[in-house]
Amino acid sequence: MANYETHEHDVIVVGAGGAGLRAAIEVSAQGLSVGLVCKSLLGKAHTVMAEGGIAAALANVDPQDGWQTHFRDTMRGGKMLNNWRMAQLHAQEAPDRVRELERWGAVFDRTKDGRILQRAFGGHKWKRLCHVGDRTGLEMIRTLQDQGVHQGITVYMECTISKLLKDGDKISGAFGYFREDGRYVLFKTKAVVLATGGVGKIYSVTSNSWEYTSDGQGLAYEAGADLIDMEFVQFHPTGMVWPPGVRGLLVTEGVRGEGGILRNSKGERFMFKYLPEATKNDYAATEEEAKEWVEATIHGKKSEARRPPELSTRDNVARAIYIENKEGRGSPHGGVFLDISYQDSERVKKKLPSMYHQFKELADVDITEGPMEVGPTCHYIMGGIRVEADSAQTRVPGLFAAGECAGGMHGSNRLGGNSLSDLVVFGRRAGLGASTYAKSVSGQPSINDSDINLAIEELEAPFNREGKNPYDVAKHMNSIMDAYVGIFREQKDMETGVAKLEELKKDVANVAVKGGKAYNPGWHLCRDLKNMMVAAEAIARSALSRPESRGAHSRLDFPDTDNGKWSTVNTSVYKDGDEMKLEHTPLPVMPDELKELFEEKEKAHA
């Protein structure tokens, strides 16, 4: 048997983004030993790419705001498929988590009287996003990292977890390897928190970086947890589309929140014609009204004007851009034009410094002088590991999940800014839940040597066979997902996609690599592909099983939202032997006092 090093902690947190850091901080605050494992370097988490802001109903700019409105916006954005309790906890606790970040040293932009400044974002009724220019995620990670380091949290960098270990039905450890040289590592623990992020690398055009290979989803699935709502993949409407080397790189919604205008190749401001009937009353009906809202925003004044149509929900804006291109009104490189150059150049540079430098350096475009070319990019998955709302525990004892790898909070479509508040609200709850669980476990759960041997054999296998090149297999997976389970879907395509993924499974199980373990990215990809396949299959099968369009799941053959059966069930997949089984499970029932919040809004529009 190969050698491996061993570390023991009460709780292991896998992933060092916002959710993982906040979970680790909470475990440490509870007086337990915590090990923080990250696939990349500390500080390189995907959270740093979140630009626009963190959503919390502080009511610093719009005093009418409150948790009830935030809750209602989140549920409506998710087309009521959210776990209501998660949405409620999120709306109620987000302000405290933001104030906590402020106490820990986060330097937010300020109102004239010194309070945290808030900006508008798609789907939010009021100006709700607390921000640091367009570098909010970076400031969050800096703040959480400093707090964690000061608490003395042990960090294992550039370490990949390949398998979760169990004692009977409960978690007992995690096995993995250090990416630098391939040496193996065993973590003995009572509880594991998964905070590994999303699945974007299964698509060819994505805002996600290389780490987003469905690791948490795959690990949880293999350990016996179920994944819910995996059909709901959000394509952010505005990613860079040119030059090819930066295709998919995110263009923050903050550009539109500060008044950016979307136009097609004919110069038409097209979003006015794509507003759904149900939300039309929330948006400006004319260019003049939209201009009034922008002017008020620029000068920090109150206005009764409704927000511009560009601030519709992400699924709606992404679909609109897709249709404009399909009907021949797109930009030269398959997108549309996003323009904020009509505003004062110094204001744009101050409010959107990252966007200014990103376009200047990567595309040789000055966004203060002309429009950006943007288009949809795979950005976020609303589905993920099923967890209990209050504790963030999965159905596997000792296994917890938070952040993007967990499902339920966002329903069928996430509102911009809700991801960052989700990280700290449920990162804290996962850390607290894991701590409470670990304290209840007497003694150290046992680990079977045979399980460790199997984990090592699986990692060694690609060196010991002739098989497929992992990069070719990954590219093939991308092409299947792009062609058959993309922004728009229909039954025949998805059936083809599922069949092709079944065939591809054989290649994933037979990938091979040459050389040694040190600095061998092809070897890393061999393991990543197994997790990516779980997510790809779950997305395709779940999408095929839902005969309606809802949120980020758009079907050409079922264009309407079905407010009967399909509004009351989650799609769930779980491992049964070597097969993926699928079922539809009932949504938790919302209590009457929360239902009344929606009835009040309906009366207001009547």
Image (cartoon, rainbow, N blue to C red):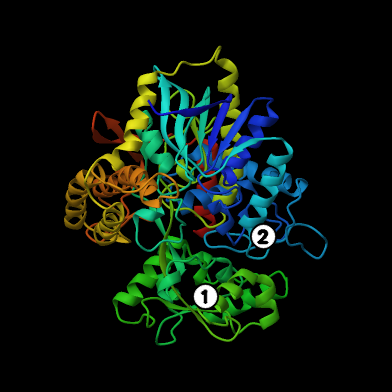
Few, some or many residues within 10 Å of mark 2 (<14, 14–19, 20+): many
Q: Give the answer, above or below, for where 606 lies relative to 67.
A: below
The residue that mark 1 highlights is: 362
Image location of residue 49, percent across then percent down: 56, 59
Q: Earlier in the sequence, mark 2 or mark 1?
A: 2
Q: Position of residue 326 (x, y in %)?
A: 29, 75
Q: Position of residue 377 (x, y in %)?
A: 41, 64
- Answer yes or no: do the residues labelled 2 and 1 have beta carbons within 8 Å? no
Amino acid bearing label 1: Leu
Q: Residue at x 43, y 76 (%)?
A: 243
> What residue is drawn where x is 30% and y is 48%?
513
Q: Residue at coordinates 65% horizontally, 52% vertically from top-left? A: 140
Q: Quadrant of the N terminus?
A: top left
Single out the mark in the foreground, 2 or 1.
Answer: 1
**Helix or strand or loop: what does disc 1 sit on?**
helix
Answer above or below: position of 270 versus 465.
below
Residue under numbered circle 2: 131
Q: Which quadrant of the figure has residue 247?
A: bottom left
Tell me which corner region of the image, top left, top right, bottom left or bottom right, holds residue 129: bottom right
Query: The residue under label 2 is which amino acid type?
Result: His
Local secondary structure at mark 2: loop
Left or right: where 318 falls relative to 303: left
Any part of residue 138 in sight: yes
Q: Say whether residue 109 is left or right of residue 91.
A: right
In the image, residue 546 lies at what x, y percent? 27, 47
Crowding around mark 1 (Cα neighbors within 10 Å: few <14, some 14 to 19, many 20+) is few
Q: Using the image as rendered, state which of residue 145 and residue 94 is in the foreground.
A: 145
Q: Please identify the residue farthest to the front as the structure is shown.
A: 515
Q: CA distance from mark 2 to mark 1?
A: 24 Å
